[in-house]
Image: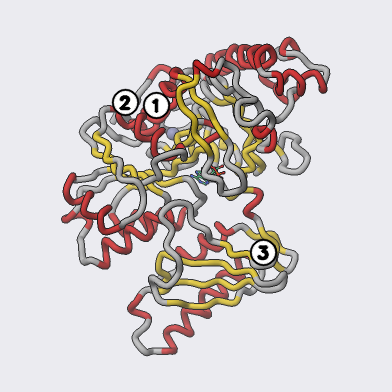
Amino acid sequence: MELPFWNREIERLPKKNLKNLQLERLKNTLERIYEKVPVYRKKFQELGITPSHLKSLEDIIKFPFTTKEDLFIDYPYGLLAVPLEEVVRVHTSSGTTGKPKAIFFSKKDLETSAELIARCLVMTGATKEDILQNSMTYGLFTGALVMHYGAEKVGILVIPAGPGNTERQIELMKTFGTTLLHMTPSYALYVASVILEKGLIPQKDLKLKTAYLGAEPYSEQTRRKIEEMLDIQVYNCYGLSEMNGPGVGFECPYKEGLHLWEDNFLVEIVHPETGEPVKEGEIGELVLTTLNREAMPLIRYRTRDLTRIISEPCACGRTHIRISRILGRSDDMFIVRGVNIFPQQIEEVLMGIKGVAQNYQIVLENYDEMIVKVEIDREFFDGRIERLLYLKNEITEKLRQTILVRPKVELVEPGTLPISEGKAKRVIDKRTL
Ligand code: ADP
Ligand code: ZN
């Protein structure tokens, strides 16, 4: 069966043509920022470099990085490459880590971001017959609005639900016959658990087919858990405000990595400390250059997100590069007893254990101990202490095998840990408070 495409020609553009297009757009981007953005001109001059030093795509490494801190130089308008009157929208990052970064869109940028989302949605089989419940936060955060316009472009009916009020979310699903969901994975786990607790049978009582989950890292185990709970397909959706928001990386039906639209982004993976390119296929920090952005082009942007490139061609026929799911942000990593740990490693173990419910929390009180609070399915609280003890041991052992540190596991009843409607805060680090 021929899989659907939104823009067949560009999505299957032969690699060579794609590279040529990238080079042409990269040249253009470098020339524009050199001419129009004093912040960049200064950076180029400091390195003694001009756009003419770019002869091939590989030459990108001669150019300066843009860091999160750079976005605050001449804040908020310092990185604009067009006059302010050409700008039609501002978004800010959700501010998970510090002061919000301001990102500006021209009319053309809004069209492009919608086009990229349209490619993503159609890639996963969405059509104009679908109904999307968009449960990301509307407003300054890119998550909801960028998805919203992209879905409308496909002709999808969009329910601008926003996050939270889970009862209402479920009512909306029932009333309008929602087929597609867009939310964070942590919230999806919660919503799924409420749907099941209410005794609803997803296949019968709801029309859900697909969920686009992103805005925070999650593991393959979590994906499977949600797919099973709701009997749907879950696709990983990666993005960051600095690069338009959602739809920067998106899974195709093969779910073996996220495609990145290379006609719009140039992808590099560098060592998070040295900034040097890593060997092909190695894990490192994702660095992105916008190739088709008008209002606020960014070059070599250090995302701090860790991933690796999957270079084999994808069975779906798209020629655009794939990255693995995001393993975490370099700033998410924490250290206990000298061991580097990412919250996602813990999530992966927990979500694969039968009896573990949807919520958990990691508490760090000192440098030697990690407390993992885990919500357990209600049926375990039936008075049989040995079942609880057995489960607690299983969790402790499996975590120890993966992260090499023996955690202190506390089992709690479902509904006792804070619920997240947007990005979950999994780690409470009291050491730095
Ligand atoms: P903030 O940095 O304030 O959270 P954004 O709201 O723009 O800003 O969020 C972008 C970040 O969210 C990404 O850099 C990444 O760390 C995380 N993220 C987004 N989507 C995913 C995903 N599918 N998997 C893992 N992490 C994600
Ligand atoms: Zn594919």
Q: Which residue is mark 2?
A: 153
Q: Which residue is nearer to you in this view: 131 or 33?
A: 33
Q: The C terminus lies in which quarter of the figure?
A: bottom right
- In the rendered image, the vertical position of residue 32 relative to residue 139, given as above or below: above
Q: Which residue is mark 1?
A: 114
Q: Amino acid at mark 1?
A: Ala
Confirm or deny contact between disc 2 and disc 3 (CB under 8 A).
no
Q: Which residue is nearer to you in this view: 8 or 87?
A: 87
Q: The N terminus lies in which quarter of the figure?
A: top left
Q: Residue at x 73, y 18 (%)?
A: 41
Q: Is mark 2 within 8 Å of ligand 1?
A: no
Disc 3 element: loop
User: Horizontal placement of 391 versus 178: left or right?
Assistant: right
Dividing the image into four quarters, tell me where ligand 2 lies.
Answer: top left
Q: Which residue is nearer to you in this view: 34 or 73?
A: 73
Q: Residue at x 20, y 60 (%)?
A: 201
Confirm or deny contact between disc 1 and disc 2 (CB under 8 A).
yes
User: Horizontal placement of 45 versus 356: left or right?
Assistant: right
Mark 1–mark 2 distance (CA, rounded to whole Å):
7 Å
Disc 2 element: helix
Image coords of residue 249 (percent x, y): 49, 36
Task: Please name the colour scheme applied to the rendered image.
Answer: secondary structure
Q: Which of the 4 image quadrants contains residue 336?
A: bottom right
